[in-house]
Image: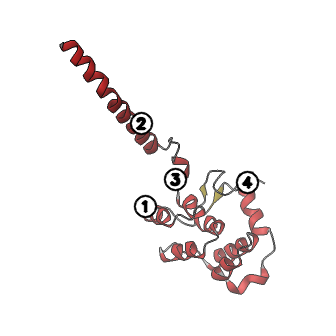
Amino acid sequence: MTAVRTWVGFVLSLPIVVALAAVLTVAVMERTGSGSWSAARPRNSAEAAAMGRAADVVRFLRSGDDATRIYGIRAEIIAPTVRLVTTYEAAAWSGRVEMLRLLDREGATVDAAGRRDLACLSLDLAQPRLAAYLAPEILPACEPGRALALITARTTGE
């Protein structure tokens, strides 16, 4: 009779043990970045900005990311030919003026020349609202395609 109770107890507890092991496995995989959902999680402020994830941008900036530093990003975030961008440049790809305002509010400043370059990039990306926010005085002065070509050249090494 004792052997039967032990066997029944084992059989009844097995689903709980398996479920707990599965949950722990997923938690460990997510924590290490190898989980199936971790691809959607940004790895730095540039990825977060490109994805339009404001809370993550703030978290990265407050943890020490520099919005003017060039970060490596995954190919699926923007494009396979765009793998090295600053957080500001990535924000231009998000297409959201609010993301640029957030960077400015967080103290992630870029000089006048940098804002001009970002405005030209925004025009290359067909984002005139972003360009108007960044540097409205330079809109007619951008050479079409040049800013985008410079960023693409970083990845391709040309």
Quick check: 90 left or right of 55?
right
In the image, residue 53 lies at what x, y percent?
52, 63
- Ranked by sequence position, the earlier of labels 3 and 1 is 3
Dot in front, 1 or 4? 4
Q: Earlier in the sequence, mark 4 or mark 3?
A: 3
Q: Distance between the residues labelled 3 and 1?
A: 16 Å
Q: Which amino acid does label 1 sit on?
A: Ser
Picture coordinates of residue 131, whole percent (x, y): 68, 78
User: Marks 1/2: CA distance?
Assistant: 27 Å
Q: Is mark 2 on a helix, strand or loop?
A: helix
Residue to which mark 1 is pinned: 63
Label 2 or label 4, whichever lies nearer to me, is: 2
Query: Mark 3 highlights which residue?
Result: 41
Look at mark 2 in the image and give the residue it sits on.
25
In which quarter of the view is residue 152 placed? bottom right
**Amino acid found under the numbered disc labelled 4:** Thr
The mark that comes first in sequence, 1 or 4, is 1
Do labels 1 and 2 touch, CB within 8 Å?
no
- Marks 1 & 4, CB-CB < 8 Å contact: no
Going from the N terminus, do you reach mark 2 or mark 3 first?
Answer: 2
Q: Is mark 3 on a helix, strand or loop?
A: loop
Mark 2: few, some, or many residues within 10 Å (few <14, many ≥20)? few
Whether residues under marks 3 and 1 lie with C-beta atoms below 8 angstroms apart, the answer is no
Distance between the alpha carbons at the discs numbered 4 and 3: 21 Å
Residue highlighted by disc 4: 81
Q: Distance between the residues labelled 2 and 3?
A: 18 Å
Q: In this view, does 138 lie above or below 62?
A: below
